[in-house]
Image (cartoon, rainbow, N blue to C red):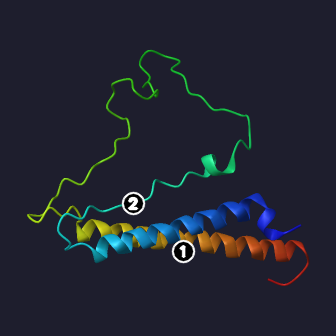
Amino acid sequence: MDLMNMPMFAALTDKMRWHQARQGLLAENVANSETPGYRGRDLKQYDFAARSGPMSSATLTTSTTRPMHIAVSSGDGSGFDAQRMANFEITPEGNGVSLEDEMMKVTTNMMDYQAATSMYQKSVGILKIALGKSA
């Protein structure tokens, strides 16, 4: 069996490619941080479930069994729904890139990429051990 046909390796490879593409966009944002009128760009968050397709038909739901329990359904007005925050900092030249924010994104992206490559290496090591070869 080809290593790249295994679902875990295909997903990790896809995730690493996503991080590489995101790093390119973040580098463009940093490079154009002083360009008048430039607006920063970013990739949509990577979603393993959307990329891998339906692997399982099992679902998990929560329910409130007593009236004093906290309701967990989204959109119930409890104020716990996830929200996207927009960058409202605009320079006098009309530039919407904050170097501090972009450098934080670059660092986070780099750490996530390193975690994915580490998982990839560990998985290859596990397969070698399973095949009876030394890791």
Q: Position of residue 22 (x, y in %)?
A: 46, 66
Which numbered disc covers residue 42?
Answer: 2
- In the picture, measured across the screen, residue 123 lies left or right of residue 94, that is right
Tell me what residue is drawn at x 19 percent, y 63 percent.
37
Which numbered disc covers residue 21?
Answer: none
Identify the secondary structure beneath mark 1.
helix
- Mark in the foreground, 2 or 1: 2
The CA span between labels 2 and 1 is: 19 Å
- In the picture, measured across the screen, residue 51 lies left or right of residue 131, that is left
Q: Position of residue 99 (x, y in %)?
A: 24, 71
| Residue identifier under label 1 | 114
Q: State the residue in front, 76 or 90.
A: 90
Residue at the extreme bottom of the image, as rendered: 134
Give, as a three-letter code, the residue at label 1: Gln
Quadrant in the rendering for residue 63: top right
- In the picture, measured across the screen, residue 7 lies left or right of residue 59, that is right
Q: Quadrant of the C terminus?
A: bottom right
Tell me what residue is drawn at x 84 percent, y 84 percent.
134
Quadrant in the rendering for residue 118: bottom right
